[in-house]
Amino acid sequence: MSTPEPPAAPADDGETIPTLTEVVELSGYDTVELPESLSEIDWPALEARIRDNLIGRLLQRSDPLIEQEMRGALRAVVDRAVEAIASELNDALASVVRDVVNRAVSDELTRVQAEIARRRGTT
């Protein structure tokens, strides 16, 4: 009875994001550099190299993901900005209308007073 073969990793077409189950080749880490035993491995340096490699690969392939996230975040920011601007415009418009009406009432009252004074002076 033979053991089943592990599933083959998908072909790297430059569009897929590596998963944690895939073997990631370390660029710039030559097999000649590998120590003879696990105890000789500089684990922090290896971890940093793996992290840098994965981040580089993710950044190369995640432009659509980042763009989608940015669009969503920007949409929310723009929506809030539009709401704030609309609210400020409504407040400004209400203030302008109040000022115009107050001036019109004042002008009309002045005209009425002048008309009454003119009539009194002519009678």
Image (tube, rainbow, N blue to C red):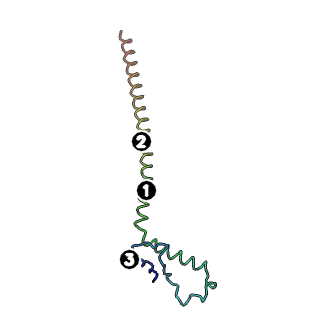
User: How much space separates mark 1 and mark 2, taking CA atoms?
Assistant: 22 Å
Mark number for residue 74? 1
Residue holding disc 3: 13
Tell which residue pokes out farthest to the right in this image: 39
Count of labels in the image: 3
Above/below status of 112 relative to 80: above
N-terminal of the pair, mark 3 or mark 2, is: 3
Instruction: Classify the position of the C terminus by image quarter.
Output: top left
- Counting from the top left corner in percent of width and height, residue 104 is at 38, 27
N-terminal of the pair, mark 1 or mark 3, is: 3
Above/below status of 18 relative to 89: below
Instruction: Classify the position of the N terminus by image quarter.
Output: bottom left
N-terminal of the pair, mark 1 or mark 2, is: 1
Nearest the eye: 16 or 79: 16
Q: Nearer the viewer, mark 1 or mark 3?
A: 3
User: How much space separates mark 3 and mark 2, taking CA atoms?
Assistant: 52 Å
Label 1–label 3 contact, CB within 8 A: no
Is 49 left or right of 122, judged from the image as shown? Answer: right
Dot 2 amino acid type: Leu
- SS for callout 1: helix
**Which quadrant of the view contains residue 88?**
top left
Tell which residue pokes out farthest to the front in this image: 1
Residue at left offset 52%, top offset 87%: 30
Nearest the eye: 97 or 1: 1
- Counting from the top left corner in percent of width and height, residue 85 is at 43, 45
Q: Nearer the viewer, mark 1 or mark 2?
A: 1
Dot 1 amino acid type: Leu
Residue at left offset 43%, top offset 46%: 83
Residue holding disc 2: 89
- SS for callout 2: helix
Q: Nearer the viewer, mark 3 or mark 2?
A: 3
Q: Residues within 10 Å of mark 2 (few under 14, many from 20)?
A: few
